[in-house]
Amino acid sequence: ETGVTQTPRHLVMGMTNKKSLKCEQHLGHNAMYWYKQSAKKPLELMFVYNFKEQTENNSVPSRFSPECPNSSHLFLHLHTLQPEDSALYLCASSQASSGGVTDTQYFGPGTRLTVL
Amino acid sequence: AQTVTQSQPEMSVQEAETVTLSCTYDTSESDYYLFWYKQPPSRQMILVIRQEAYKQQNATENRFSVNFQKAAKSFSLKISDSQLGDAAMYFCAYRSQSFNKFYFGSGTKLNVKP
């Protein structure tokens, strides 16, 4: 295991539901990421947090809302999702320098999300 | 924006043989990092190997090695003595030297035949 955990591992939700994905890293890193992985498509970077501050938001719809209360935890709050949001959501962490540049990412196992 | 292209959606190799996975990328930067990640079925994505663009020497990790051709913007992964446990999706990734962004290819599924 790489020290990054995600819960739940599987989630099925309706379009009107509100749910949250959780990520926790045990590696002492200070940067965390959310990715969306759809079949036969490149990983899509959604959000980046450096030192608990959001530094990237790659034009993600507002129905996805990230939260990073500390450098070890990252949440992705979901509401009024669409069926096309069904995918594997991966969390990753890395060690960022004071200049914000990071190196190798370590990934969690992902949450398989199905939106009905 | 940088793009990473993996032109082989799926490949197969016989156990104990050698296979090469291709990756090309597009960038105007001179300094950057390249990675190969492995994602086994229903398991976590893990780093296989990384390469700094300023290093001319190709990176090697046990049975895994890369052929980094900076001018051609090519970064292929060679797996020697393939094992059944090498069966997985392999993703090529690019990271800017200056910016906290990673760009991934669409992946290559590697099958290993006994």
Image (cartoon, coloured by chain):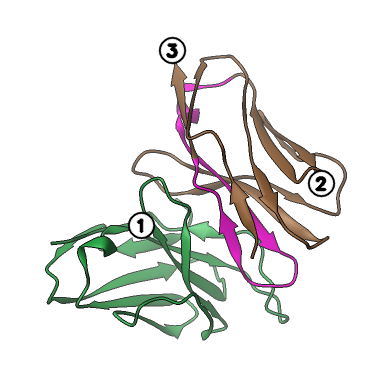
Taking the spot 59% from the left edge, 62% from the top edge, the residue there is B102
For the N terminus of chain B, the quadrant is bottom right
Left or right, A105 with respect to A85, comes to: right
Residue under circle 2? B70
Q: Is B68 within the magenta?
A: no
Give the extent of the magenta segment. Answer: B82-107
Percent x, y for residue B56? 88, 44
Q: Residue at x 48, y 54 (%)?
A: A2
Percent x, y of residue B64? 66, 32
Image quadrant where residue A116 sits: bottom left
Query: Residue flagged by tag 1: what amino acid is it?
Result: Gly
* Residue on which disc 1 sits: A110
Measuring 26% from the left and 59% from the top, which residue is drawn there?
A86
SS at badge 3: loop
Q: Is residue B73 left or right of residue A58?
A: right
Q: Which chain is green?
A: A
Amino acid carrying label 3: it is Pro
Vertical placement of residue A106 versus B110, above or below? below
> Which structural element holds mark 2?
loop
> How far separated are the C-alphas under marks 2 and 3?
35 Å
| SS at circle 1 | loop
Callout 3: residue from which chain? B
Q: Please name the amino acid that badge 2 sits on.
A: Lys
Query: Residue at horizontal 42%, vertical 39%?
Result: B40
Q: Is B32 displayed left or right of B114 in the figure?
A: right
Q: Which mark is residue A90?
A: none
Disc marking residue B114: 3
Distance from Cα at disc 1 to Cα at disc 3: 29 Å
